[in-house]
Image: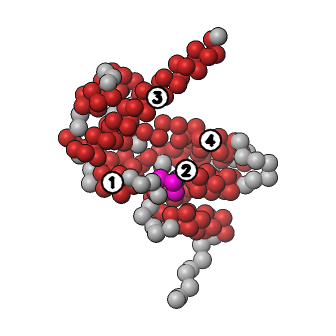
Amino acid sequence: MTVSSVGRRERKKAATRQAIADAALRLFLEHGYDQVSIRDIADAADVSTTTVFKHFTGKEALVFDQEQDREAQLIAVIRQRTSGQSILDALRQHVLDTWPPIETHPQRAEFTHLVDSTPELRAYAGHMWTRHTDALATAIADELGADHDDLACATLAHYVLEIPTLARGRQDPRAAVEMIFDILTHGWRPPTAH
């Protein structure tokens, strides 16, 4: 009995969180980021402002509502990869599974315009993935038996987390991700003249 009530509670929390995020994005797209208050979002989602802040740290987090579990997912990718799978291959698969679908979403153009036209959101987006560099570098170092301050592990983590920024807006986001991972895997080679 306890298990089902916990499950129900978690489902309700997740549904409330999603309702808040959906209301926020709708309002931001309709009225602009700066014209929408937390109170507006709470009213649209039929919750209190306190409830909004229980689920989100601020307005920026409402726009990027999927950010919450990213660090745990990145660490799990490293620690739970299949036997024989390299760290880079596991990270490549994770980025390919999570990032290109965002780039091809039907609301991407509207969402991108919202982010690009709002300095706070541009800054938040720029740091969204890279804020997890230390945690990812530590997970990589742990898997390799290296020191937590190992520069090679930190460098790899940093560049992997920059991939969405580098590949953003490319005609074929998936191909861009693959190309960047190929550079990380095999090293950089100068492009040949066409």
Q: Residue tagged by mark 4? A: 75
Check if mark 1's residue and mark 3's residue have beta carbons within 8 Å.
Answer: no
Q: Please count the marks in the image.
A: 4
Give the quarter of the figure containing the N terminus.
Answer: top right
- Mark 4 residue element: helix
Give the dominant element type of the magenta stretch: helix, strand or loop: helix
The Cα–Cα distance between marks 4 and 2, rounded to whole angstroms, is 14 Å
Q: Residue tagged by mark 3? A: 15
Percent across and percent down for residue 192 are: 56, 85
- Mark 2 residue element: helix
The residue that appears at 46% across and 28% down in the rendered structure is 15
Give the magenta part as a residue range: 98-102
The residue that appears at 26% across and 54% down in the rendered structure is 117
Could you classify mark 2 by the number of other residues whose Cα lies within 10 Å: few (under 14), some (14-19), or many (20 or more)? few
Identified by mark 2, the residue type is Thr
**Of 53 and 187, the residue lying toward us:** 53
Q: Is residue 13 above or below residue 66?
A: above
* Label disc, if present, on residue 110 of the rendered structure: 1
Note whether residue 133 is visible: yes
Identified by mark 3, the residue type is Ala
Q: Residue tagged by mark 2? A: 98
Going from N to C along the chain, the mark reached first, 4 or 2, is: 4
Percent across and percent down for residue 61 are: 38, 38
Going from N to C along the chain, the mark reached first, 4 or 1, is: 4
